[in-house]
Image (spheres, rainbow, N blue to C red):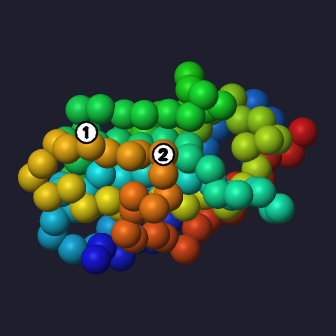
Amino acid sequence: QVQLVESGGGLVQAGGSLRLSCAASGRTFSRYNMGWFRQAPGKEREFVAAIRRSGSTTYYADSVKGRFTIARDDAKNTVYLQMSSLKPEDTAVYYCAADYAGTSYGTYYYSSPSEYGSWGQGTQLTVSS
């Protein structure tokens, strides 16, 4: 299993921008599909964005489409979540997650937490109004 460490969270004003990073251990990062999820207090964990192992396909929750961008740098074993036009409702703990895909491009249930076998510890984002 890959080990994941998120960073980049913090306090930002509404309308601002922030970039989260998720660094992965191991030499097979390129074989993992990667996702970002978030969980606000009292709410279930929800899907935010995902990217296939090739980087060729990305997916977004409707609530962040057009404001967030997911990207990966396989040379650095890192996946990013660039967030802009932030809203108070974006406040949550953000988690990155890894789904081992090997060399296949099979079915990828990107929005389902159960699809992912590895999770980071999370990083807090607070957006003030």
Q: Earlier in the sequence, mark 2 or mark 1?
A: 1
User: Can you give x and y, in whole percent of width and height, for residue 51 in the image?
Assistant: 35, 42
Closer mark to the observer between disc 2 and disc 1: 2
Q: Where's the C terminus, which quadrant?
A: top right
Q: Where's the N terminus, which quadrant?
A: bottom left
- Left or right: residue 81 versus residue 89 is left
User: Element at badge 1?
Assistant: loop
Q: Compared to 37, does 89 lie above or below?
A: above
Observer-nearest of 98 and 72: 98
Q: How crowded is mark 1: few (under 14 residues within 10 Å), some or many (20 or more)?
A: some
Location of mark 2 (residue):
111
Location of mark 1 (residue):
55
User: Can you give x and y, in whole percent of width and height, for residue 55 in the image?
Assistant: 25, 39
Q: Residues within 10 Å of mark 2 (few under 14, many from 20)?
A: some
- Left or right: residue 50 versus residue 106 is right
Circle 2: residue type: Ser
